[in-house]
Image: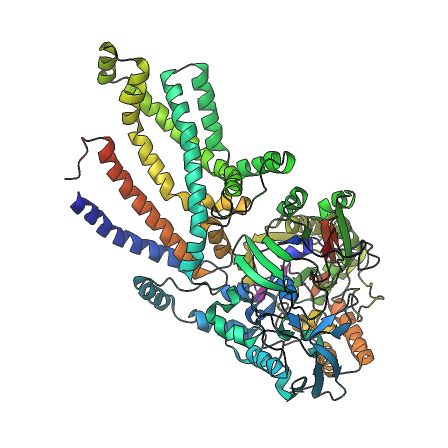
Amino acid sequence: MRWVAVAVAGLVLVAACGPSGGTSQSGGTPKAGGTATIALESELRTLDPLDSSLLVEREVFYNLYDSLFTIDPSLKITPGLVKSWDVSDPMNFKFTLQSGVKYQDGTAFNAQSVKDNIQRYLTASTSRRKSDLASVSSVEVVDDSHVIFHLKKPGATLLATLVDRAGMMLSMATVQKGGQNFSLAPVGAGSGPFQFVEWQRNDHLTLKKNPGYWKSGLPYLDGVTYRAIPDVNAILAALKTGDIDIARTIAGKDVAGIKSDSSFIYRDTPAIGFNGFELNTGTPPFNDPAKRQAVALAIDRYGILKNINFNIGVVGYGPIPPSSWAFDSTEKIYDHADAAKAKTTATGFTFTYKTTSDPINQQLAALLQSELATAGITMNVQTEEFATYVQECANHQFQACNVNWSGRIDPDGNTYAWWHTKGDFNDSLYSNAQVDAWLEDARVSTDQNKRKQDYLNAQKQIVADAPYVFTVFGVSAQISSNKIHGFTLYPDLMIRMAAVWKG
Amino acid sequence: MTTYVLRRLVLMVPVAFLVTVGVFMLIHLSPGDPALIVLGEDRNPQAIAAIHQQLGLDKPLYVQYVIWLGHIVHGDLGRSITTHQPVTIAIGERLPATVELGAVALIWSLLVAIPLGTIAAVRRGSLADHLATGLAVGGVSIPNFFIGIVLIFFLSVTLRLFPFGGYVPFNQDPVENLRHVILPAIALGTAGAAINMRFTRSSMIEVLNQDYIRTARAKGAPWRRVVFIHALKNALIPVVTIVGLQIGGIIEGAVVTETVFTWPGVGRLAVESIFNRDYTVVQGIVLLAAFSYLVANLLVDLVYAWLDPRISFA
């Protein structure tokens, strides 16, 4: 909702595929003025990156706050509030900051502000950023525009982490003034293209243009309004009535209709998450690797892509999607369904698959059930209310559980937490010493080629051991009225509004 | 009268207490961990433990209850687990929208129910009676979410006569406010309209058969006057009971309608809070719903005395 680890995701397909060509779309000379309304798939809970855990929150943050680093559409790390950097010393990262940047409350962004922000993320009792910044030992202020991040261990993933919430810089004056209510009304806290106006919970969140934005000429729009519309059919209806201008997800079945309607724009690009279901290696029947492999072999990924995702996206074989530099294009060991091979691997067993009542998850379950039946495997579907299902999957009380991942910019975020023996998301209780070693090495190695080799090795092993059955990779999409221009698609699903204009 | 009201108010306390115990147990015993919901993809053992400690979820349930009750007695409903917003503010922000929706739905239901019920009673057995009865059966049988979806499809998406969902505060734009409230109010009020219509009809039939009506007719009072002045006021007593209970039940009724129409009221807050296991908010809303029932019941009893002077509270 809700987040993400589930469900909503897979299916709501913004899933997957499709040609996208360029990721940026233009339509003449940018025009200033006007406002745009964006649909969010769920209500936000906080406007403070410190305690945020929802995808929809990040979507708003990227327009309110600036991060130390940014990405380009190919996921390459690019300058943000950090203008240039030197990471040749793996234990001490040296950053040069942009100068002349001011927060919307008028206070200056500088090295002390970076130190204070990181300190707050590391120490506040409600901070959810502690594990993001686990590699950071301290931040040293060299002068107003230079800082050094001292690390506890080499942190190959740190720059990517600082693109997201852990790297978002807030005015400490406003944070302190806001106190306990800061997360509800962060007026003037950011340095981003838009500033907070009001948040009428369960209805709308309004931002207005930041006239003093440090990137000159931007943003074009006078304001952005977000509306939480939790149902994909309702999002489509709102798009058609003109109540919203931009959406990130609609139901897969409706994509073709939108594509063929000239009053709308539909474009997509491969996203960074993965979809599928986890198998519990700690309990029967899936403590037997052959049974996990049989399930992975019997699944027809192309059938899922076509019937559930309406061919939006691509089939998935491993945890790292095609948008990443660590994608393994050779990985096809479970390509098309192979019921015969599945049968010779393991057959005649029964297991229970947990999922939520989301209609698309239900259709997927029914499809999986019928595909597995052809290999002599009986899958029972257990539908649960969301909170119950989350708890049972997290506590290893399952045989198979339908959990998707929204994805991270660095491949570490799509692997370590899930399949390292001590990973926080290792619901499957998977443990392989070699995989642990590769994933650990990739965390500390600064040589990208070496990291890539680590991930290729780890992916092959994870896919072969099948603690998770990958099905499809989703897409990041622009679904908007044809009046929206200057929209750049990013694989991380975030809608960045600074350069968007309305014609 | 004053003694009566006071006695009723005192009696509310034990009822409310039982409600709090029930609610607290129900929500805490249902599976699901708010820490996992709050953390989402950021979950890790340290963060989960920290949240459990902050919320006091690591203490035994009865201790948690006593702590919560202690705060309530001091008028403190606590803060939302997911948003950290004070529960009183979270509910207070959404209450106007729910009250408006409930009030318009009630007006709609009475505007439909009383005339139709009266006509159906006066012309018993006629085509009008059958039609009204048929509509009532439909109104009660069709769930309000379905009525909502049908209204959205035809009047909003297809004909574009009304906006699709959402809410505009009355003080911001009264016209838009009314345009937004009409469809959800019809969806929410239709079942009530059907019930009220049936009650008006049967009660009216009963009253019209009474001696004083025949006397009034025999004295030569015009039929119209007999129906609207002599009969209707008395016939409405049972309707008032039902309407009173409907007022008390606005919050539950709004749960589904507000979700369908993305109406930012207490009902939708309740749904989201239950899904998120936001214990403090759910408890606050149920407490409010229980009190509105109790107060509505009391008011109904007081209105009785006004409608029928034979009823006294001595």
Point out residue A99 in the picture as x, y percentages from the top left corner. Answer: 69, 79
Assess whether residue A402 is covered by the magenta stretch: yes
What is the magenta range? A392-407
In the image, taking residue B63 as reference, residue B155 lies left or right, namely right
Point out residue B261 in the picture as x, y percentages from the top left corner. Answer: 54, 44
In the image, taking residue A57 as reference, residue A182 lies left or right, namely left
Q: Is residue B171 visible?
A: yes
In the image, taking residue B71 as reference, residue A103 lies left or right, namely right
Viewer-nearest residue: A380 or B37: B37
Q: Which residue is drawn at 72% across and 45% down?
A: A253
Viewer-nearest residue: A144 or B200: A144
Q: Which residue is drawn at 58% across and 41% down?
A: B163
The N terminus of chain A: image quadrant: bottom right
When the figure is inspected, residue A451 is found, relative to residue B218, above or below; the finding is: below
Viewer-nearest residue: B105 or B145: B105
Q: Which residue is drawn at 63% across and 38% down?
A: B157
